[in-house]
Amino acid sequence: MRRPLVPTLLLLLAALAQGQSPAFSTTEGMQKEAKASVILLERLHISKREMASIDMAEVVRTYCENLDGAKMYFTEAEVEEFVNRYAKTLDLYLQRGNLTPGFEIYASFKHKVQVRTEASLAALDQPIDLTRDEVFPLERRKAKWPATAAEADALWAKRLRLDMLGEVLGEDRTNATARKANGKEAELVVTPEKLKAAAARLKKRYDKIRTYLNYDVAEVEELFINAYSTQYDPHSIFFSQQSLEEFEIAMRNSLVGIGATLADEDGYCTIKDLLPGGPLDLSGQVKPGDKIIAVGQDTEGEMEDIVGMRLNKAIGKIRGKQGTSVRLLVDPAAGGGRKTVVLKRDQIKLVGQMASARAFELGAGQGVVGVIDLPAFYGKNPDGSGSSPTKDVEQLLEKLKAMGAKAIIMDLRKNGGGLLTEAVDLSGLFIPKGSVLQVRDSGGRIQDYRDEDAKVVWDGPLIVLTSKLSASASEIFAGAMHDHRRALVVGDVTTHGKGSVQNILELSRFDRNLKSAVKVTIQKWYAPSGSSIQLKGVGADIVVPSVFSVLPVAESDLNRPLAWDSVAPSLAQPDEGDWLKAKLSDKLIADLAAASARRQAEMPEFVTLGRSIEWTKSRQARQEISLSLATRLQERKDDIIFRDQVRKDLAAFAQKGAKVADVKLDAALEQEKKEGPDYASKSKKISRIRDPLEDDDWPEYDIQLREAVRIAGDWVKTLPATTVATKPAETENKSR
């Protein structure tokens, strides 16, 4: 039950608030956004929780963490002062859409940043001792705030040394690369000149902190509202206009811009990669490493300096409507003077994030194993252009069948999800009809999402390759294939474990002038067996671990995840119809698992994989990092030796591996006609998720994938030669 608002109480609290005066105030639009967020969460969230059940003290603490994630600026006493000041009446503020507490806390935070930055800059004028054998605590987000100001000072003194070490070692890493290219190896010698140069670079970075943490009012609003919304679950969040645009870009798999990956380097908007076929790439006037100094709209007029500007704001000025022009003042990394580059913004298809395939030879005349890499369950653009993963995968399946594919591997290891409907449609390519998932809403109503199209594009051996990163829609597909006994699930012990459904609710429904939205968890989904994927994920039939298996990237690693539960099954038993040419019996699964276990125990590449996992695990287990230069140098030397050995091992394995051929979508081939033969591969390399050990020159040999190919080969050997379909079934072809 909501409490009555007492305006005089709110005014009194605001008057008594200590600390810095807020630079922002609640606008009418913000008020509507905050009120709407509260209403939508209360009414639509699957938990059916009212505001009265939310611990407002935790909201305040979460907001402080949103601002001070490393817990370096606030002290524990200051945070608790905020709790005491606001927690008892925060519900009143939120009900009325009054963001004053958030703005006041942010003002205090901003002041703390200013004071701390000035102190750090002054400290850098003095010599920094890098010989003391002390440590800095890692995972600061999980730590407590410093208890006192003196403890905060001591923590910052260590932080200063940590950052100095980073500058010294980072600069040497660059020089070491050059020495290695020249065939020379030399130990790092830290001279007074190098320390002075490192301190100068660090001063520049610290000076920019004031800019980096100088949030605009929309960013503060978003952080504050999300401190409340994430008390429901980690996926229920408020989107500002800019955040909503970024989210929609990710879902559409395309954007309108200049076609570049940008990064903030010491306050400069720096070009990291050029997206093949984008306006910037086609201009031929810039290279990675060049800095964008200023941005101008259209072909004439004043240019706005963006040096020191927060990266998201700089990107916002560079992006714009398709067909419009933008001018960039570029400072080339190679020198030669600044130049103005005029570009016309265009829609850039993120081909590297679309489905792609490769064909692995099983042996002379034995056909191939097709591997389809699906990085996301993307969707079409609002105007209907673009493609869908289902259509793209279907096209790749037909091409692989024409090449003599005997088995298919769906690689979802780095697929974080996307559109639920696409997961259902994709499942339909591999089963004739049947339940794919069940969805339960906040009222307890259950809907069975089914594939009703009898068409089967592939009825042969199917493996779903997963990891701890496989989440949401990828888990829907994996769970459906597992429960139908349609596919063998191979990979990490289990998938990510995200079994909830979110709906994007644009706030224009409350006011047409609002461009923001709220993403609310409105449903939970369940595999056909009735088991929720939430927290537990989809378990592997055959475990072939990856380095991701030891990373804290699962749903269970998030704050306040929803609980696991179950519903009645929608699939009484797996389909045993004659349509399936590659049935999975318990004995077959056991035999394939045993064969894989033998290889994992005997083959040298699994020794390398095991060492890589243990290396990653050891780094994840670290609670602290040394502040001694000598210790850090030895650690880095050991890491370099280890990485080099892994790199050599992978290169040697690649020499003996099966032949592999790329299989590309028609869209990628069309783009390559325009942009060059490396368009698709370059785009994919830019957009992919890297393993923790990977460097830029990492050999392309995937131990986990190669074992999945071997498992597929073992499965194929158990089948009569005539059992693998090479043509789609002649059944009704409904539109997907």
Image (cartoon, rainbow, N blue to C red):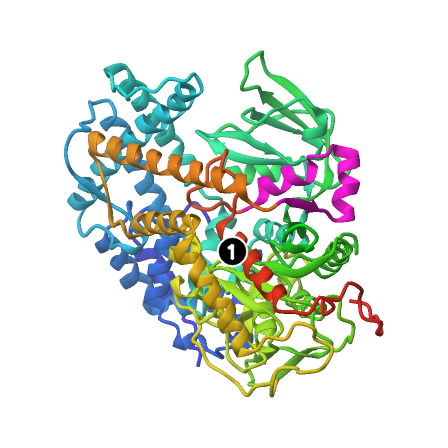
Residue 325 in the image, given as x and y percentages of width and height: 73, 32
331 relative to 159, above or below: above
Residue 227 in the image, given as x and y percentages of width and height: 42, 60
511 relative to 6, above or below: above
Tell me if 328 is positioned left or right of 646 in this view. right
Q: Is residue 310 magenta?
A: no
Which one is in front, 214 or 389?
A: 389
Q: Let me know if residue 702 appears in the view.
A: yes
Q: Does the magenta stretch mainly form a helix, a strand or a loop?
A: helix
137 relative to 39, above or below: above
635 relative to 3, above or below: above
Q: How busy is the neighbourhood of tag 1: few (under 14 within 10 Å), some, or many (20 plus)?
A: some
Which image quadrant is residue 285 in? Answer: top right
Residue receiving disc 1:
707
Which image quadrant is residue 380 in? Answer: bottom right
Which one is in front, 380 or 244?
A: 380
Which one is in front, 332 or 322?
A: 332
Which one is in front, 207 or 549?
A: 549
Tell me what residue is drawn at x 72 percent, y 28 percent.
Answer: 282
Q: Is residue 671 magenta?
A: yes
Tell me what residue is drawn at x 59 percent, y 46 percent.
Answer: 658
Q: What segment is highlighted magenta in the picture?
A: 659-688
Tell me if 401 is positioned left or right of 133 in this view. right
Tag 1, which secondary structure? helix
